[in-house]
Image (cartoon, rainbow, N blue to C red):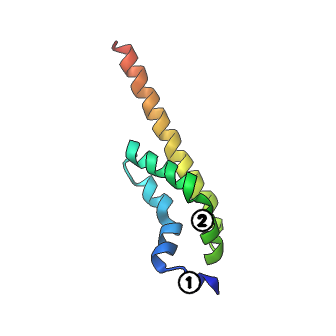
């Protein structure tokens, strides 16, 4: 009943943001936005998923975000190793 009060664009964003994240070029700006989202909106996102009956999406979405962050860290580490090797 409460789900009908959640606009379609909010439902879409809640369900699919992590898929868009995985297909994006991850740069410092995107990482800052992800950090802001986690710090200020994460609980609202989880609450909204509960309202629309999609709580099962939460684990996969967070795992996708974690994977993206791990890949980004590995890339930075590789770049640092290459930079130090050439220094």
Identify the element where label 1 is drawn.
helix
Which of pointers 1 and 2 lies earlier in the amino acid sequence? Answer: 1
- x then y, percent, for residue 43: 63, 61
Identify the element where label 2 is drawn.
helix
The residue lying at 38 percent from left, 46 percent from top is: 29
- Name the residue at the front extreme: 40
Answer left or right for 19 relative to 27: right
User: Alpha-carbon neighbours of circle 1 within 10 Å: few (<14), some, or many (≥20)?
Assistant: few
User: Alpha-carbon neighbours of circle 2 within 10 Å: few (<14), some, or many (≥20)?
Assistant: few
Inter-mark Cα distance, 1 to 2: 15 Å
| Image-quadrant location for residue 47 | bottom right
Looking at the rendered image, the quarter that the N terminus falls into is bottom right
- x then y, percent, for residue 53: 64, 76
- x then y, percent, for residue 73: 49, 35
The residue lying at 43 percent from left, 27 percent from top is: 78
Q: Which residue is mark 2?
A: 44
Q: Which residue is mark 1?
A: 5
Q: Which mark is residue 36?
A: none
Answer left or right for 24 relative to 55: left
């Amino acid at each position: 009943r409460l789900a009908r009060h959640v606009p379609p664009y909010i439902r879409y964003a809640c369900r699919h943001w992590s898929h868009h994240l995985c297909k994006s070029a991850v740069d410092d700006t995107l990482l800052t936005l992800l950090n802001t989202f986690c710090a200020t909106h994460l609980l609202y996102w989880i609450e909204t998923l509960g309202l629309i009956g999609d709580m099962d999406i939460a684990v996969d979405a967070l795992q996708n975000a974690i994977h993206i962050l791990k890949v980004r860290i590995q890339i930075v580490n590789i770049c640092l190793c290459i930079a130090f090797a050439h220094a």
